[in-house]
Image (cartoon, rainbow, N blue to C red):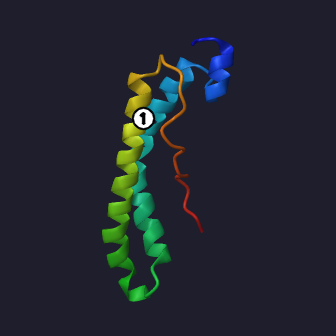
Amino acid sequence: MFLPEARASFGEKGPVQKLARGFAHVLSAPLYIPKEIIQTTMEAEPVYLAPWKGITFGVGKGAFLMGRQWISGFRDIFTFWTPGPPLFEPDSLLLEI
């Protein structure tokens, strides 16, 4: 189970990297809310509704992504000694222009 071949099949490098990935996910998760507010405001079609869509839809989508990343991060933190892939590949925190 802890053979290098088994870790390579899961795409893992080891428990230290899984623990570090978990902490990175947990610490960066709150950044999804302002990112999604800005992204949704930039993509709003009628310009006069941009602030409203940014606040309502952006906060909702950002909260969903934040919760998803927290779950993945806490799972990696509490199970770092077992090999396995992450629950999901997180979206980029950079704005898409």
Position in image of residue 79 (x %, y %):
42, 22
Position in image of residue 68 (x %, y %):
39, 46
At x 44%, y 29%, the residue is 76
At x 49%, y 74%, the residue is 42
**Height in image: 56 above or below 2?**
below
At x 53%, y 19%, the residue is 15
Image side of residue 95 versus residue 55, left or right = right
Q: Which residue is mark 1?
A: 73
Position in image of residue 83 (x %, y %):
53, 21
Image side of residue 25 versus residue 55, left or right = right
Residue 12, quarter of picture: top right
Three-letter code, disc 1: Gly
Question: Could you tell me which quadrant the N terminus lies in?
Answer: top right
**Height in image: 64 above or below 25?**
below
Helix, strand or loop at mark 1: helix
Position in image of residue 65 (x %, y %):
40, 52
What is the crowding at mark 1: few (fewer than 14 residues within 10 Å), some, or many (at least 20)?
many
Residue 97, quarter of picture: bottom right
Residue 94, quarter of picture: bottom right
**Height in image: 32 above or below 41?**
above
At x 45%, y 59%, the residue is 35
